[in-house]
């Protein structure tokens, strides 16, 4: 099955700096890569996703890049703000495997004021 | 629009007890799934369903049963609770087809403690 690895497990940044989280996946048939944000005590919520036919996608201060050849994708948060503090999960979904989502272990991001 | 409704929010069980976590969605999603979340391990898939009457095992199915008699409901049953099942459980639903509308919506979570 799909194996998704996520790094780093924790990330502390100064407010206004950028944060980058990287994920690798094992199944070359994976074609959908979402990122979820989970605030303390809340449910995970989708913040951005990218499909395998696209190399980069931006939405205001967040962006995701995908390198299919290397089987890795990254989340970039620019101009970080205190409300960006949360746990972020990457995931990969395989069309051929009942559309199951496989998640990374998560990155706890802390934005220091 | 309620989205994904999951109950209860908190539960304490004694070892050996059984219980059912409820999950319902009103978005007419074909795909529903249960995850458990443990520190440092992300979200691990327990069971999933691609439609009414169809269920399958995920990554960590042992000790859990599911059924999908309707499109809306996907209950998770703990047959004989063990301390190792202490976790936060999330139900999720999504459309399952193609490359569109694949966002997974999560329930509010159930914090389960087995003593």
Image (tube, rainbow, N blue to C red):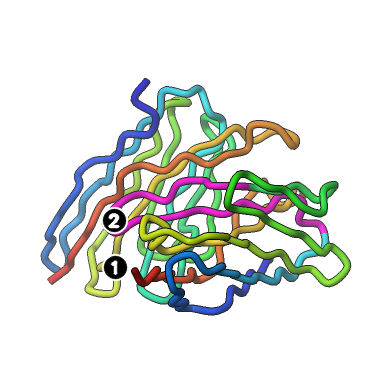
Horizontally, is A23 left or right of B55 in the view?
Answer: right
Secondary structure at badge 1 equals helix
CA distance separating discs 1 and 2: 9 Å
Q: Are marks 1 and 2 in contact (CB under 8 Å)?
A: yes
Q: Which residues are magenta?
A: A29-48
Q: Residue at x 48, y 71 (%)?
A: A107
Which mark is first along the chain, 2 or 1?
2
Residue A28 percent coordinates (x, y): 82, 63
Report the front residue among A45 and B35: A45
Residue B54 percent coordinates (x, y): 56, 37
Q: Is residue A38 magenta?
A: yes
In the rendered image, the quadrant that contains the N terminus of chain B is top left
Secondary structure at badge 2 equals strand
Residue under numbered circle 2: B78
Instruction: Say which of marks 1 and 2 sits in front.
Output: 1
Vertical placement of B65 versus B28: above or below? below
Chain label for disc 2: B
Q: Residue at x 12, y 71 (%)?
A: B115
Q: Which mark is residue B85?
A: 1
Q: Residues within 10 Å of mark 1 (few under 14, many from 20)?
A: some
Chain label for disc 1: B
Q: Which mark is residue A4?
A: none
Horizontally, is B36 left or right of A56 in the view?
Answer: left
């Amino acid at each position: 099955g799909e194996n998704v690895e996520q790094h780093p497990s924790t990330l502390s940044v100064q407010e206004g700096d950028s944060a980058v989280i990287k994920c690798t996946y094992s199944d070359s048939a994976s074609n959908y890569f979402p990122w979820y944000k989970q605030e303390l005590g809340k449910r995970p919520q989708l913040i951005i996703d990218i499909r395998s036919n696209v190399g980069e996608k931006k939405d205001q201060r967040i962006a995701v890049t995908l390198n299919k050849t290397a089987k890795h994708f990254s989340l970039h948060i620019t101009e970080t703000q205190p409300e960006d503090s949360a746990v972020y999960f990457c995931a990969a979904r395989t069309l051929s495997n009942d559309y199951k989502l496989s998640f990374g272990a998560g990155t706890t991001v802390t934005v220091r004021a | 629009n309620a989205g994904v409704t999951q109950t209860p929010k908190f539960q304490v069980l004694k070892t050996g007890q059984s219980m059912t976590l409820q999950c319902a969605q009103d978005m007419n999603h074909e795909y529903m799934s249960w995850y458990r979340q443990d520190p440092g391990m992300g979200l691990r898939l327990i069971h999933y369903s691609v439609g009414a009457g169809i269920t399958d095992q995920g990554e960590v199915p042992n000790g859990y049963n599911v059924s999908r008699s309707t499109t809306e409901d996907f209950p998770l049953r703990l047959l004989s609770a063990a301390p190792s099942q202490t976790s936060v459980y999330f139900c999720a639903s999504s459309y399952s087809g193609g490359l569109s509308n694949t966002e997974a919506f999560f329930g509010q979570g159930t914090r389960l403690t087995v003593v």
